[in-house]
Amino acid sequence: MGSTFMIPVGLQALAVAYPSRRMSNDYWRRRYPELVKNAEQHASKRVWQAPQTPTPFDLAMEPHFHDAFLGAKERRWLLPGQKVLDLEVEAATKCLAAAGVGVDDVDVALVSAILPDQYDVGNAAYLAGALGLKAAFNVESMCSSAVVSLQNAIGLVASGQAERVLVVVSCAYSRLTDEDDPLCWANGDGAAAMLVGRVDGGAGFVSSHIHSSYKTNGALITAPELKHGPDGDHLVMRMRPQPGAGQKIGSDATPQLVLALTRVCAKAGVSLDDVDAFALPAGVAWMADFVTRALPAVRREKFRMFHDRYANTGPVMTPTHLFHMLHEGVARPGHLTLLFGIGSTSNAASMLLRLGDVALAPLPDEGELA
């Protein structure tokens, strides 16, 4: 939709929170040398494979193909016993502190967790209990949840149903794989919080677009598995790629990206060249090269990627990149900024915002290298 709001609504504050445990590639080289060697020798059997007819996604992947870690260097993981709710509370608290507002000033929170701390329900009510929020509900759109939630938050404020809305997204991918599974090398944990409300100075919502990514249905599944341990057997949730998962996701990546970014610009009557900054996801290490191959108008100096620092943190990636870009001045007040998120078995979502004076929490601590 394009902007028809009578009042300007946009982003007021932004914060991120990451666990203190940094998992470097050397951790696996020390503990699982044969696993790493095997991954290097059997690259063709992994999730990401080199097809006979490469797409821009595949061409961008090629330099990383024989790297066991596929370009990832570090990832942040929850400490043993740590809850992802702890990260959500930290991000939300830092966001409100940066904005200089209290919990009572927030009308509702939109919360998305992959995965929450319990299987029967999301973290929204637990976050409300931890912070004393008036109301909170769960939003699920997988890795596009941050942008989808932001769209909904802006709609709530613009329609007069709320004055301020807190968006909180989190990811706990480390729970979904064992550490001796190479799939875990690409995944990390983290959380982000965004405060939405009225803005001024010409800032605020410009346009948005969303469409389904149903073509990736079934590429990755998460299901319970029986795990044997010294304290007995118990069920755990595990993420498993299905046959052809990499090809299914890779072949769908280019049309999803192109459609989402061009449609949101068309609704605003602007071109990609008019966009000053891009906040993009980085589910893979080659995302930057892929984007510039598929859409040369998205110039590299207009965005930042931190897959090498955080790996794939699902819906947390887009707000994390925007957070760092604001700290570095790559994105700043007055900039027309495009936010994009894409998830498997969910949606591709994009939004154009004119940035105002976004209050920022401090950068995350460096953490401890494992």
Image: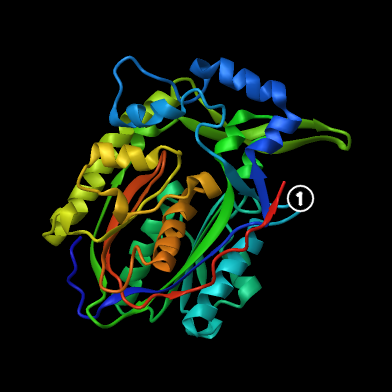
Task: Point out residue 177 in the picture as x, y percentages from the top left corner.
Answer: 64, 36
Seen from the viewer's position, the closer of residues 13 and 144 is 13
38 relative to 234, above or below: above
> Hey, which quadrant is residue 50 in on the image?
top left
**Residue sticking out furthest to the left:** 269
> Hey, which quadrant is residue 264 in on the image?
bottom left
| Residue position for label 1 | 80
Image side of residue 184 versus residue 242, left or right: right
> Coloring scheme of the render?
rainbow
Q: Residue at x 41, y 79 (%)?
A: 164
Kind of residue indicated by mark 1: Pro
191 relative to 143, above or below: below
Is disc 1 surrounded by few (<14), some (14 to 19) or many (20+) residues within 10 Å? few
Seen from the viewer's position, the closer of residues 100 and 122 is 100
Seen from the viewer's position, the closer of residues 94 and 205 is 94
Task: Point out residue 138 in the picture as x, y percentages from the top left corner.
Answer: 50, 60
347 relative to 266, above or below: above
Task: Point out residue 181 in the picture as x, y percentages from the top left corner.
Answer: 65, 29
Task: Point out residue 363 in the picture as x, y percentages from the top left corner.
Answer: 54, 66
Q: Residue at x 41, y 55 (%)?
A: 318
Mark 1, secondary structure of its residue: loop
Q: Is residue 12 visible?
A: yes
Q: Residue at x 57, y 15 (%)?
A: 41
Image side of residue 83 versus residue 121, left or right: right
Q: How many marks?
A: 1
Q: Residue at x 34, y 76 (%)?
A: 157
Quadrant location, the N terminus: bottom left
Q: Is residue 339 visible?
A: no
